[in-house]
Amino acid sequence: MHALVARLKAEGAGFVLATVVRTVAATAAKAGAKAVILPDGTLHAGWIGGGCARGAVLRAARDALADGEPRLVSVAPEEVLAAQGVAAGEARAGVSFARSMCPSKGTTDIFIEPVLPGPELVVLGESPVAAALAGLAPRVGFSVVRALPEAARRQRFVVVATQGQGDMAALRAALAAEADYRAFVGSRAKWAALAGKLRVEGVAEDRLATLAAPAGLDIGAIGPEEIALSILA
């Protein structure tokens, strides 16, 4: 289980870790049982019980992946829910309740923990600033890639740090990519000149406006590490 979780994190895949935290009476799974649930609803590994709890757990896993919030699911017989003054489908004090139809009449409480990938920083270029960005970004929670994947699987930031080596090709790629943020490392004058060439190529003005130039906050950065810090800030 630990190896699987580590692999999924390394791949940047979102998933849910479901853990049975309490059981009452006869249940298929006992406290401490765990399972990994993928976004498509596949129970990839582990065991949290049979059909009595699975539907409620998979629904909770889907919701947790959507909003990023953990939750506790209590799957109990109707009479137990009634005794607690709650109904199936109701949520109260952070607990979602579901009805168990199992003849064993057991109750299972499962903690649903979404594990979501961190934001993706795409660094285009082989400049000193690009190297500084790639080195610093993982320390503040970014997953760094040096080329644009075909599709964004998470929040994505694209920084063009070519600094004269392949500027136009990198800018075309950045502007065409699906991204939450785009930036260019360079002066305003340099960006103005490159933007003019992109306009001639037919890049729309509203698309050009999505790219921040110069990249980063104005903190008086001079060296590559300072510039990288200003961008990540």
Image: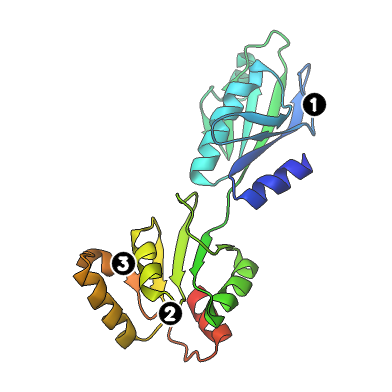
Give x and y (percent) for residue 100: 63, 16
Pointer 3 local density, CA inside 10 Å: few below 14, some 14–19, many at least 20: some
| Disc 1 versus disc 3: nearer the observer | 3
Which residue type does callout 3 highlight?
A: Thr
Sequence-first tag of 2 and 1: 1
Up-down relation of residue 199 to residue 44 (above or below) = below
Give x and y (percent) for residue 187: 37, 86
Question: Which residue bears the numbered disc 1?
Answer: 30
Nearest the eye: 77 or 32: 32
Picture quarter containing residue 138? bottom right
Left or right: 214 with respect to 148?
A: left
Nearest the eye: 225 or 63: 225
Give x and y (percent) for residue 58: 58, 28
Pointer 2 local density, CA inside 10 Å: few below 14, some 14–19, many at least 20: many
Picture quarter containing residue 139? bottom right
Up-down relation of residue 21 to residue 223 (above or below) = above
**Disc 3 to disc 2: CB gap under 8 Å:** no
Up-down relation of residue 135 to residue 6 (above or below) = below
| Disc 3 versus disc 2: nearer the observer | 2
Which residue is rendered at x = 58% and y = 25% of the image? 56
Question: Which residue bears the numbered disc 3?
Answer: 210
C-alpha separation, residue under disc 3 versus residue under disc 2: 14 Å
Q: Secondary structure at mark 1?
A: loop
Sequence-first tag of 1 and 3: 1
Which residue is rendered at x = 39% and y = 75% of the image? 167
The circle on residue 185 is 2
Picture quarter containing residue 198? bottom left
Up-down relation of residue 130 to residue 56 (above or below) = below
C-alpha separation, residue under disc 2 versus residue under disc 1: 55 Å
Which residue type does callout 2 highlight?
A: Val
Pointer 1 local density, CA inside 10 Å: few below 14, some 14–19, many at least 20: some
Left or right: 84 with respect to 49?
A: left
